[in-house]
Image: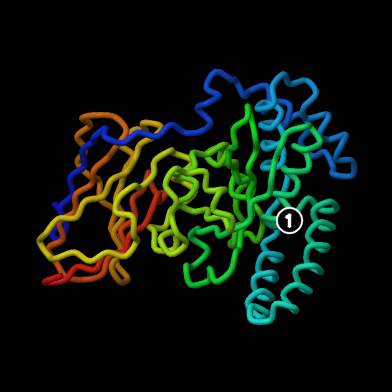
């Protein structure tokens, strides 16, 4: 056993959330995905024609929207340089609303020109394209602007809205999705965009979506319990692997914690997809040292995982909950002699 941490994992079932996509559990999306992949590489010179080709053979709106979403997520690259340029300009003009408006107007033109010509864009372009294609297929779809948190965006940088995604109306109910974060990521080693489709952002459960998406118009949270922006910014950092594996943190609700030495602290995860828990690891970072722990797991009941830590040494630790080498969420724990 590790000399400074004791770990126990058990499962409990007092908390249950169905993913929104499960509303369509009887729908087979293979046909919609096949249509999207059959049109891989199609250009954007004629959006009405593209919308028709992606949807006209599919019988339901949810399948039509799935084909649109899959196509956008697997054909449009994220414009990393454009994101950096936009962020830099917005920082520069954050106290000058007139200059910020001028920049936004000029940059929007650049965004859509690059999208149509190169199939490369920022989040606004993804959301615009999903909405445009959906609307052409007679599906209600809106762009939602707000704050997005991920491992590349420090909380201190979230001084203004930085992200856009979509809400789509299917069977008279609104659903949330994010084609930008479904598409993949820019590789800083190769300086190329790596397509890596993540299905977890398609019609995601609002309770989970709100962990890294916070809309300016909070009615688009679509949750029963409304959270505030400060609560959102103080929450644990969540990674896209949480959506990929369907495992999300629920407690504690804040990222930075203090715990007394030799007293335990508990974490609750919700296991939506019932992953193989033998793949669950804990990564502990302290200063320059990093250690992966293979926890003891007692699988008692479904859906929730309770993790109990007991630190025996003082210090500040980054605690990453991982599936394999992929982080699900991160907490920062300060261990003191007394709290």
Q: Is residue 34 left or right of residue 5?
A: right
Q: Position of residue 169 (x, y in %)?
A: 65, 35
Kind of element beneath mark 1: strand
Question: What residue is shown at x 58% (from left), y 42% (from top)?
Answer: 176
Q: Position of residue 61 (x, y in %)?
A: 69, 26
Question: What residue is shown at x 23% (from left), y 66% (from top)?
Answer: 258
The quadrant in which residue 65 appears is: top right
Q: Nearer the viewer, residue 277 or 91?
A: 91
On screen, 143 above or below 23?
Answer: below
Q: Position of residue 232 (x, y in %)?
A: 44, 59
The quadrant in which residue 63 appears is: top right
Q: Nearer the viewer, residue 207 or 188?
A: 207
On screen, 126 above or below 69?
Answer: below
| Mark 1 neighbour class, 10 Å CA radius: few under 14, some 14 to 19, many 20 or more | many
Question: What residue is shown at x 73% (from left), y 33% (from top)?
Answer: 139
Which residue has dot 1 on it? 121
Q: Position of residue 305 (x, y in %)?
A: 27, 40
Q: Nearer the viewer, residue 197 or 210?
A: 210
Q: Is residue 306 left or right of residue 73?
A: left
The color scheme shown is: rainbow
Quadrant of the frame with the C terminus: bottom left
Question: What residue is shown at x 33% (from left), y 50% (from top)?
Answer: 321
């Amino acid at each position: 056993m590790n000399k400074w941490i004791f770990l126990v994992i058990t499962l409990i079932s007092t908390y249950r959330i169905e993913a929104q996509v499960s509303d369509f559990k009887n729908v087979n999306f293979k046909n919609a995905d096949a249509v999207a992949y059959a049109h891989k590489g199609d250009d954007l010179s004629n959006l009405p024609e593209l919308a028709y080709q992606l949807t006209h053979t599919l019988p339901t709106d949810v399948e039509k929207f799935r084909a649109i979403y899959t196509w956008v997520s697997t054909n449009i690259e994220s414009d990393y340089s454009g994101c950096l340029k936009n962020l830099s300009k917005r920082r520069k003009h954050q106290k000058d609303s007139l200059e910020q408006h001028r920049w936004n107007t000029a940059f929007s033109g650049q965004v859509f020109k690059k999208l149509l010509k190169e199939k490369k864009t920022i989040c606004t372009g993804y959301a615009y394209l999903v909405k445009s294609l959906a609307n052409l297929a007679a599906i209600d779809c809106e762009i939602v602007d707000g704050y997005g948190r991920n491992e590349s965006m420090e909380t201190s940088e979230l001084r203004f809205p930085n992200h856009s995604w979509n809400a789509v109306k299917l069977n008279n109910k609104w659903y949330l999705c994010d084609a930008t974060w479904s598409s993949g990521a820019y590789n800083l080693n190769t300086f190329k965009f790596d397509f890596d489709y993540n299905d977890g952002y398609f019609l995601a459960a609002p309770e989970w979506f709100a962990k890294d998406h916070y809309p300016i118009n909070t009615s688009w949270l679509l949750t029963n319990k409304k959270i505030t922006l400060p609560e959102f910014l103080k929450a644990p950092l969540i990674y896209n692997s949480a959506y990929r594996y369907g495992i999300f943190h629920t407690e504690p609700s804040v990222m930075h914690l203090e715990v007394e030495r030799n007293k335990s602290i508990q974490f609750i995860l919700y296991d939506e997809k019932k992953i193989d828990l033998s793949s669950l690891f804990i990564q502990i970072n302290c200063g320059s040292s990093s250690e992966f722990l293979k926890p003891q797991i007692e699988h008692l009941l479904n859906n929730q995982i309770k993790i109990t830590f007991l630190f025996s040494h003082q210090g500040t630790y980054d605690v990453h909950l991982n599936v394999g080498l992929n982080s699900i969420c991160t907490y920062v724990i300060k261990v003191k002699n007394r709290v």
